[in-house]
């Protein structure tokens, strides 16, 4: 009797695990061979915790456009074809609920996401541009002060650029301090009429039931009882937005610098483009930034090779027939689009590990000889369809301003030892960063009269 019980228990566990691991096979999907072995369970466990490398390995393990895999005990459908992924992300409205990071889920609850899009309209961005420049100038002054104290110096630019908040434990005093600062700032704007042309001002307008589109920045305040968001909740939303999005911005800047500083020709081309900006007394013009075609290509190439969001996930809420296939994904199952693996697939981008901004060159755009071609429009670094990144223009604006100011003011040199050893890390998943930072030697550039006349 005592012997029978463990045997029965073991058999029940074994059969149910085997049932889970045959999910895709039973439905006729191309799928990996799953088994109750130590190495398979380890692989499945790593995937569950978004070890990006483990997902990339699954992507590379075959030729089918769809592959049924297992993230621990969860059957997940991996899309292994860019065109199919694009079609699904664009056309599957209503069938999937987006598995977003908490901050976006919070917005859905407050129906704020729909309100966010107009915050990043060209008009709003052009008015926020002054604030963005101020932040860039602040970074440069801080670095120049360092140089004044003793000539050229080495700095970990990743650390400087990254908003370290995302790495802080939930209840650190710094987290509280930032929330307090946001609270104070909200009070100043509501009670003392302070106007700042920034995202926070638009969030405060939303809290007071004011339109966030249009061109008004001033607040029409309402009674506390009628406010749409409590100060605490608004501070949390602003803080979460900062954490995730600025981390993506900082990693894009870090990896752009890492790549371009290894290629003096790229830096030269960027400097030549920057020199053509009118740039009176160090101040840039918003409209002119759109003309920085080569810089745009560099940023796109960074986002291709190092996408800050390497995997897009969706949970199926209403069964969905996958386009151009005989398969249907059922309610409750997860669909995964591995951006990073696709962006580094030779099928879509020749010599994928090479940093080649000119692969995006359009005919008639004369920034240089096109060296490498892109086979299709396979770039999806900002997502695609209804859930694509609403903040992408803001992100590009911030990155461009920071890059221009850094290149204008400093000769930047990578630590040569670091170049060989640099390691890209996705821990904590899924964000991307350089494991040992980005050590760069900065030397003040001779002031260019064109920049400061
Ligand atoms: C280089 C920087 C950035 C990258 C690479 C990036 C990438 C992405 C991607 C790939 C998505 C789609 C996710 C999905 O389909 O599940 C997304 C969504 C989103 N992003 Fe960004 N992002 C960046 C910066 C920003 C910034 C600066 C903001 C705001 C200040 C922002 C706000 C959002 C929001 C609110 C969504 C959700 C949109 C929706 O669900 O409709 N992002 N981002």
Image (cartoon, helix red, strand yellow):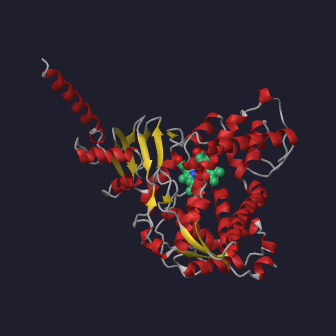
Q: Quadrant of residue 133?
A: bottom right
Q: Which residue is farthest top?
A: 1
Q: Residue at x 50, y 56 (%)?
A: 432
User: Could you tell whether 203 is left or right of 355 in the image?
Assistant: right
User: Could you tell whether 262 is left or right of 188 in the image?
Assistant: left
Q: Nearer the viewer, residue 152 or 337?
A: 152
User: Could you tell whether 25 is left or right of 203 in the image?
Assistant: left
Q: Quadrant of residue 261?
A: bottom right
Q: Which residue is farthest front?
A: 150
Q: Nearer the viewer, residue 87 or 303?
A: 303
Image quadrant containing the C terminus: bottom right
What is the x, y in percent for residue 369?
55, 82
Q: Is residue 385 visible?
A: no
Image quadrant containing the N terminus: top left
Q: Nearer the viewer, residue 323 or 397?
A: 397
Q: Quadrant of residue 180?
A: top right
Q: Residue at x 62, y 42 (%)?
A: 173
Image: 89 above or below 351: above
What is the x, y in percent for residue 279?
77, 73
Q: Nearer the viewer, residue 21 or 195?
A: 195
Q: How many marks?
A: 0
User: Could you tell whether 40 is left or right of 431 in the image?
Assistant: left
What is the x, y in percent for residue 15?
22, 31
Image: 129 above or below 413: above
Q: Is residue 99 visible?
A: yes
């Amino acid at each position: 009797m005592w012997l029978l019980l463990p045997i029965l228990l073991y058999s029940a566990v074994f059969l149910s695990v085997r049932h889970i691991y045959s999910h895709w096979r039973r439905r006729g999907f191309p799928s990996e061979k799953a088994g109750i072995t130590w190495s398979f369970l380890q692989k499945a466990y790593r995937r569950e915790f978004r070890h990006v490398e483990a997902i990339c390995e699954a992507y590379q393990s075959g030729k089918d456009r769809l592959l049924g895999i297992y993230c621990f005990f969860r059957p997940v459908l991996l899309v292994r074809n860019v065109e199919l992924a694009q079609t699904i992300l664009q056309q599957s409205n209503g069938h999937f609920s987006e598995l977003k990071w908490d901050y976006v889920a919070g917005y859905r609850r407050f129906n704020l996401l729909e309100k966010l899009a107009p915050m990043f309209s060209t008009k709003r961005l052009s008015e926020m541009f002054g604030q963005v420049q101020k932040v860039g100038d602040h970074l440069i002054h801080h670095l120049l002060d360092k140089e004044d104290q003793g000539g050229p110096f080495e700095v970990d630019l990743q650390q400087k650029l990254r908003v370290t908040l995302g790495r802080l434990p939930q209840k650190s005093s710094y987290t509280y301090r930032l929330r307090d600062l946001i609270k104070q700032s909200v009070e100043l704007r509501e009670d003392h009429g302070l106007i700042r042309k920034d995202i926070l001002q638009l969030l405060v307008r939303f809290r007071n039931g004011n339109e966030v589109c249009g061109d008004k920045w001033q607040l029409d305040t309402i009674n506390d009882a009628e406010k749409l968001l409590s100060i605490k909740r608004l501070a949390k939303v602003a803080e979460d937005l900062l954490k995730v999005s600025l981390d993506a911005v900082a990693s894009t800047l870090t990896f752009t610098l890492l790549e371009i500083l290894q290629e003096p020709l790229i830096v030269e081309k960027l400097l030549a483009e920057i020199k053509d900006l009118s740039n009176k007394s160090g101040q840039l013009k918003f409209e002119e930034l759109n003309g920085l075609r080569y810089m745009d290509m560099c940023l796109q190439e960074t986002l291709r090779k190092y996408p800050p969001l390497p995997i897009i996930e969706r949970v199926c809420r209403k069964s969905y027939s996958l386009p151009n296939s005989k398969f249907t994904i059922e309610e409750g199952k997860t669909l995964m689009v591995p951006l990073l693996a696709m962006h580094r697939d030779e099928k879509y981008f020749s010599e994928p590990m090479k940093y080649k901004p000119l692969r995006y060159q359009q005919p008639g755009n004369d920034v240089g000889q096109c060296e490498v071609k892109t086979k299709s429009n396979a770039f999806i670094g900002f997502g695609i369809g209804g859930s694509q990144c609403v903040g992408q223009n803001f992100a590009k604006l911030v990155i461009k301003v920071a890059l221009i100011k850094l290149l204008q003011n400093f000769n930047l040199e990578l630590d040569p030892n670091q170049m060989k050893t640099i390691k890209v890390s996705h821990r904590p998943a899924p964000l991307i960063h350089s494991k040992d930072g980005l050590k760069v030697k900065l030397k003040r550039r001779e002031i260019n009269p064109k920049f400061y006349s």
